[in-house]
Amino acid sequence: MASIITGDSVGLGLSCSATRKLYQTRNHSSSRLSFCSIKMVVSVEEEKKKKSFILKKSEEAFNAAKEMMPGGVNSPVRAFKSVGGQPIVFDSVKGSHMKDIDGNDYIDHVGSWGPAVIGHADDEVLAALAETMKKGTSFGAPCLLENVLAEMVIKAVSKHRYGSWCCNPRAPDSPGVPRAATYETLTAPYNDIAPMENLFEINEGEICAVILEPVVGNAGFIPPKPEFLNALSKIIKEINVLIFDEVMTGFRLSYGGGHEYFCITPDLPTLGKIIGGGLPVGASGGRREIMEMVVPAGPMYQAATLSGDPLAMTAGIHALKRLQEPGSYEYLDKITSELVQGIIDAGKKTGHAICGGYIRGMFGFFFTEGPVYNFADAKKSDKPGTY
Ligand SMILES: Cc1ncc(COP(=O)(O)O)c(C=O)c1O
């Protein structure tokens, strides 16, 4: 049996380059970047007058880290390898602001890659965490808060599903993954119906599952063409399992994630980021007969020492409560549309080919005229250093 991955699983480069430009609101020392996209956030010239931007302590800390951790980081995009430049070591965050260890302030448009959708270090979340912490930080045994968050997530994603806290999905394009495993995985370009139909035709009866991001976030921001989702729903009806990787889109496109937004119900959604409210957590959920395959209900092994710990559950519960408040997604829509439009206007004004888009709390832009429907289109963007 094979499974299909559709959605251009490689290539954080574009979202990173965008991110780096946004992080570097006050970085005057980088000669490789112009700042067309961030002029609307803060005037670089004005900032230049105020103080010079120094990353000395960040540089020292990163050099020391390189001696101890692979590439100096615990998650690869933090090393800025695909965009170049000096990684920044941060000291504190609050709301929409970040401070690095050299004392520089930043307006953050990254939001810890998603989890900080209600703002960093939210007072209510911190107070709830402080209360929970008094009872201890991990039990190595079930805690009641797991039920509370599980119920909220299940209600949000679908009434007839249930879930399980987990961690560490593996990428099929990484050394260490046996060829036998990748051999069982077929890939098709996102938003392209014919290649996907072809794969189903050639491998008739052999494909067990299709996995994709409802909106591709790992190659920038690429929403699905409605006809692509329709074709996908038709092809996979009945015998195949549809998995939506909603780690990015979950609770961001809408409270019910991508599948609520696009009105398509996957058999299995995977979640992370926002459901931990800034603390590390991941979850998978789905139809009862699928989830009952997981130990101890079934034979598929999955375990983790700190899964479902009370602090992550507390932060998740309070982040989701905030998102349940009336108007929260309308507000996200409004501020994201202003940001994206500002970036596109600034890019065009300074003579750049640029396109972009957003849905509520998820956005992206490309330095190309577009349209961008898949990773191949995204790669037509100007390379870092030329925009
Ligand atoms: C779409 C998608 N799936 C899965 C993951 C992995 O999630 P985590 O880093 O929380 O393990 C990410 C991380 O960015 C992601 O963007």
Image: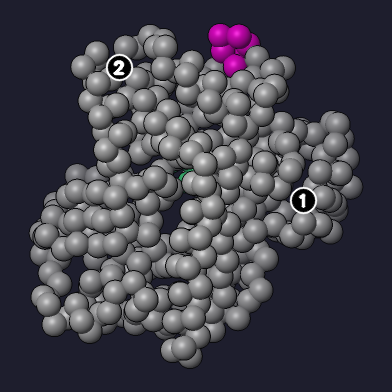
Residue 296 lies in magenta, yes or no?
A: yes
Determine which of the numbered discs, if any, sits on residue 185 in the image.
none
Circle 2 residues within 10 Å: few <14, some 14–19, many ≥20: some
**Residue 362 point in image, percent of width and height:** 52, 55
Residue found 30% across the figure and 41% down from its top: 122
Choose between 80 and 286: the one closer to the eye. 286
- For badge 1, the amino acid type reads Leu
Q: Is residue 275 visible?
A: no
Residue found 11% across the figure and 75% down from its top: 51
Q: Is residue 223 visible?
A: yes
Residue found 23% across the figure and 59% down from its top: 88
Task: Give me the C-alpha separation between circle 2 and circle 1.
Answer: 41 Å
- Can you name the residue that lies furthest to the front here? 326
- For badge 2, the amino acid type reads Ser
Verify CB contact (< 8 Å) between mark 2 and mark 1: no
Residue on which the image places disc 1: 229
**Residue 257 point in image, percent of width and height:** 60, 42
Residue on which the image places disc 2: 138
Earlier-in-chain disc, 2 versus 1: 2
Q: Which residues are magenta?
A: 294-299
Which structural element holds mark 1? helix
Which structural element holds mark 2? loop
Left/right of residue 73 with respect to residue 269 in the rendered view: left
